[in-house]
Structure formats: C-alpha cells, structure tokens
Image (cartoon, rainbow, N blue to C red):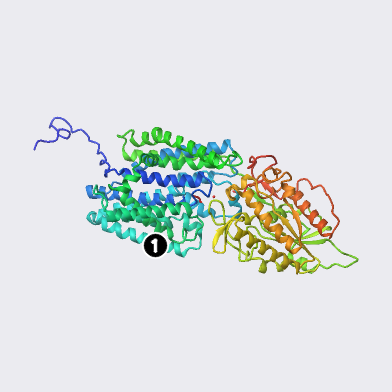
Amino acid sequence: MPPDPATSVTQDRAAPTVEPQPAAPVRIPHAPGLDGLRGAAVAAVVVFHAGPPTWMPGGFLGVSLFFTLSGYLITTLVMAEVERDRSMGLAGFWSRRVRRLIPALLLVTIAVAVLARLVPLGRGIRGDIIGALTYTTNWLEIARGQAYGDLFGAPSPLVHLWSLAIEEQFYVILPLAAWLLARRSPERLRRNLTIGAIGVTVVGLVATLLTDSATLAYYGTLHRAPEIAIGALLACATRPTTVPSPTWLTRAAFGAFVITVYLWCTAHVSDGWVTGGGLVGFAFLSALLVRTASRPGRVADVFSASPLRSLGLISYGLYLYHWPIVVLLSPPRIHWAPVPLFILRVAISLVLAVASYFFIEQRFRRGWPATPTGTVILLGIAGLAVTMVISLAIAPAGPKERVVRRPAPAVVDPKDAATQTTTAEAPGPARLAIVGDSVPSWLIRDGGSGLDPKRVALVDGTLEACDGARGNPVARASTGAEVPTPEGCTGWPSQYPQFFERADDVAVLMVGGHAVLDRDIEGSFRGPCDPVAAKWYENDVAERLLFLDQYAEHVVLVLPTWADDLAEWIYPTDHLARMDCVRSALTAAARSEGAEVIDFGRYVCPDGPGRCLPLRTRDGMHVDPDKAPAALSWLVDQVLEVTGTGPPEQTTPPVSTTTTTAATAAPPAGGGGGEATGDAAPSGGP
C-alpha cells in the first residue's frame, strides 16, 4: 500500500508536523419530535412564569421534562462516542458544551447587570451573578433558605438559572464517569452506566424522602439527579432507531402526555408530592414521552408540528431571557391586565430568543471550527471570569435592611405586663395586648419607640407569618410556594392566653393578611372567597374573639387593609377582591361577638383599594419603617378612643424615629412616593 501523501517523507526533507485533530462529534439520527417536546416543555415554563398563577400553576414541571430529556440525549451521545472510538474525548465534549451554552449566558448576565444599574429591582444581584457564572445558582438558593420577608420582595432575575446549574453539573460528572469506565472496559460501558443510573435514582430518591427541607429537595443536585438519571437509564436501555413505535407504546405515551398536561394545569410547587419524591414518578412519564417522540409514530408526528419544533430550537435562549423580562415587566414598573401583560412579556422574550439563536448561539456553535478544543475551553473559562468581573462592577449593591431595635419603653414583655399593678390613685398607662401577624409585628418593631410609656403599655403578642388560626392551615403564595410557618405558630388556643393575665387589658386582634392566600382548609386549598373557606374563617375568628373576651375587658378587631400591586409576588392578582372577602368575614365575626371594629384600611387607603397612600414602598403590604411610628400611634389612638380606656391624644409622630436603616443609598424599591429604607429580598422558582 502506498504511503499516505499527507504523512510521507523523503530522506532529504524533514517530515512536516501534523496537528492531531479531534475526532468528529458523534451524530445520532435527528428526531424532530424531540425538538417539539423541548418546545412544549419551555412553553409550559414560560406560561407558568409570565402568565397569571391560575393559568398553568404546574408549568414548573417543564423543567423536570428538560432534565429527563437532557439525561437521555447526553447519555446517548456519550455511549455512541465510546462505542465508536472505545474512549471518551473529554475535551471535545466540553468544548461543544462551551460553544453551545456559554455565549448566551454571558450576554444575559451582563444585560441583567446593566438592567439592575438602570432600573431599581429592589434587591442586590451580585451574589446571583456569581452563582450564574459558576453554575452554582441552585446551591446559592439552598444557602439562602427562604425567609418570610423574602416572599414579598421581587425575585432575582437570575434565579431561574438554578436548573441550568444542575444540568451543567451533570455535563461535568457524566463524561468523567464515562471516561473512567471506558478506560477499564469500553464494551461494558452501557451496563455500568445502567447500574450507575439506577444507583443515582435510588440514592436521590432516598435523600429526598429523608430531608425535611423543601428548599433542599427542590434545588439540591442529588435530590433532582434522579430525573436526569432516568433519562440516562432510558438511553442505556434503548438505542436510536427509525423503527416506528408499537401501538401499545404509542397509546401509553398519549396517556402519559394527558397526565403531564393535567399536572401542568393543576399541580402546585407547594404540593407535598413535588418535594416528597413524586418527581421521580413524573420523570418516568417524561421518559415515555422522550422514547416515543424520538422514533417515528403518531407521538412524534404531534411533537413535530412546526410551532413546537420552532420553540424547541430556540428553547435555550427563550428560557434564558424570559424570566428577566418577567421581573422587569412587573409592578411597580408596569400595571397591565393579565392578558396584555402576558402577550408583551412573551413577545419580547421570543424576539430576544430568536435573535440570540441566529446571531449568538449558532454563530459560536458553528463558527471557527478549526479552533482547538482546548483553546475553546480556555476561552470559555476566561469569558466567564471576565464577564463576572464586568458584571459585578456594573451591578449596584443591593439595599440591606438592618433592624436597629431602638428603646421602646411603651412595649413591654408579656411577663412584665403581668406583674404590673394599678390602683384608683395610680391607674398607670392603658395596657393593650396586640395579637396578629407580620403587619402589626413590623409596626410594633419599627414604630414602638414612638409611643409614650406614660400613656400606654403595649404587649406584643404578634408573630410574623402566623395568622393564629386554629390548626394553622398551610398557606401558599401566588407562585405556589408554601409560606413557611415559624416556630411557635401553634394556633390561638395555645398562643393567646400568655398575653392576657389581667382583667383590665385591651385585646387587639389584627390579622387577615394570610387569609388572602389559598389555604389548606378541609382537605383542599381554597381562597378566601370560597364559601367553605369564608365560613370557616368567620367561625374561627368569632371563636377567637369569644376566647379573648374571657381574658380582656375590651376586645377590638382591626380590619386589614388592601395590599398594593408590589405584593403580587406573594399575593394573587385578584388580591383586592380576595381582601374584600376577608374583611367581610372578619366584620361578620366581630358583629356576632359584639367586638369593637377599627378599619386600618381607612388609614392606609382612605380613597379605597387601589388608591392607597405611599406608605408601603418596600413590598406593598408592610408599612415602611419611617412611616410606622405615625401608623402605630394612629392605631393606638383609635383603640383607646373606641374602648374608652384612655383619652385620645393626637400627636405628631417624632422625626427620625425609624428603626430600620439602609446600609447603602439604594433607590426606592417601589413607586408612588416616600423613601424605601430597606428591602425584603424567590422558586423557585421555577
């Protein structure tokens, strides 16, 4: 056989040096149905984020479908390469991931940093930038946890990258495992990966069942790994084929799709099965769809429809860009009806995704093919580092709330209040015990220093995130996230008695904010306008008022006020109508028990709902710290007046009595006036 001209040499001429070229990437038969399946998954996620919560509350499950599809595709490619070359080219695999994923990520990160500089987002994003560019957003969310105040603040425009972080971690681990296994026994790779996928599924499921942290179960790499591993298991158990799916499999797949759509439309992220191992079962449904969509048949025909395929092609960019657009186009920056707002959000996201696909993603993915794989990887790492430096320099530091509990002599500990005595000659200050949720809790915290201790002794019986209802029913935010229950929130029968140990106390009940949310009442989540929930709450509050009447000489019920649109990150979009239902139930309860009623809405929203004073620029629900002293003084004056326990005294709230200061000079988080001195910084996300 004659020598290869490219490498032949002569005795009087040195042989030219030939650069080794990386092996050509493995190609598997293209399956248009998988593009459409990817498009359906991203559509569910976009509707979940960009539309009202009632449209598709289970759209977050589209991410789970992504996980299973990615596990299948990547494992198929890895095994095909090992079967062809009897080895795994790590540099080639990772360089292709760099070309495919990093350019658009760099663009969206810088764009969000610029956005945060130009538009007050109400939170800092520097930590989110680091998480995004190191693919550790999921662990960043776990480390942060979920404080109650966080539910009311706008979420990070980069929080949705938690799912990409998990996928990228998978892109590192699987090729390494395949490389090690291929070095020992390439012909047994399929069997060994099957064993590994089963092991990951079992371990991940057990870890999920054992943890009591919903945040860890939702964001943890190990806890979400079974969804990817089941896709990998499917790849190990099957091979790409052009043979049509059998009839029984097609029927089973259509059944799986019906169940999937049903769950997209009915599930909530706070449902117990979501963080209790149920996503493993959902992953098997997804695997069934992946298998039938990847081979000819009726299922593949459905998902090969042009609109779904087109969405699938731009799914990466659409996922990247849609969430920052949703955060940007939200109150207080825009106040549109749900349908026009959804159309605007989706239209802008689609334009950005299409432009990104043709001018960014495809250009870097296909361009400069001769660039060595090692160089591509180094350029990717350098790009991440440089973008991090630039983005951190551009993004402003977020406002940090520091609670400074100034001396408040008028606010007394319940035990101290119980030891105080009064006589006819020395009546002392009127004693008010306020029980309630976070609205009065933050009022007392931030405004208690403005009260005159000679006039009133205020016993603080409030607890944030705790309505005090009997049985403490679980509540969930508009996103579907469960509102955390604080320690000590056990229900009024056990909570309230400790605050009323004198017959001449005034009991003030100030609740209702929690009742606007969907709560688990009589076996299902119900809103406050549901007749069952409304009657249940009315009866519960009436029982509380009767209970309090046994401990206090006077009982006062404070009607809650309507929230501003800023609170829509936790409240449903129809929160004004829901609050009307809550106020009606409370009024009926007070009427039945003969309790005095004070309407806090008259103070905050004197012109009615939707036209409130600019007193709650932090989150649309809680009175700002610098406005709290005046609001609390007004409330105390009203209580003393209606109960006749003390002379009403109209005082001008002292200047600079704010108990919360801003660590940084950040712009206001809300609109309409006033200064935001702090920020309550979601889940997720999706």
Q: Where is residue 653 in the image (x, y as percent from the top left)?
A: 79, 48
Q: Residue furthest top?
A: 12
Left/right of residue 501 with respect to residue 427 in the rendered view: left
| Foreground pick, 603 / 328 | 603
Looking at the image, which is closer to me, 683 or 538?
538
Binning the other alpha carbons within 10 Å of mark 1 as few (below 14), some (14 to 19) or many (20 upward) gives: some
Q: Position of residue 222 (x, y in %)?
A: 42, 57
Q: Where residue 25 sits in the image (x, y, percent)?
A: 27, 42
- Picture coordinates of residue 495, whole percent (x, y): 67, 66
| 613 lies above or below 202 | above
Residue 381 visible from this viewpoint: no
Q: Nearer the viewer, residue 246 or 531?
A: 531
Image quadrant where residue 613 sits? top right
Q: In which quarter of the image is residue 382?
A: top left
Residue on which the image places disc 1: 203
Point out the residue furthest to the left here: 1
Is residue 622 visible in the rendered image? The answer is yes
The answer to whether 255 appears left or right of 463 in the picture is left
Q: Quadrant of the N terminus?
A: top left
Residue farthest toward the right in the current orientation of the protein: 425
Q: Is residue 211 left or right of residue 79?
A: right
Q: Residue at x 70, y 55 (%)?
A: 440
Residue drawn at x 32%, y 40% is 373
- Label 1's element? helix
How many labels sit on residues? Answer: 1
Given the image, on which type of amino acid does mark 1 rest? Val
Quarter of the image where one finds residue 116: top right
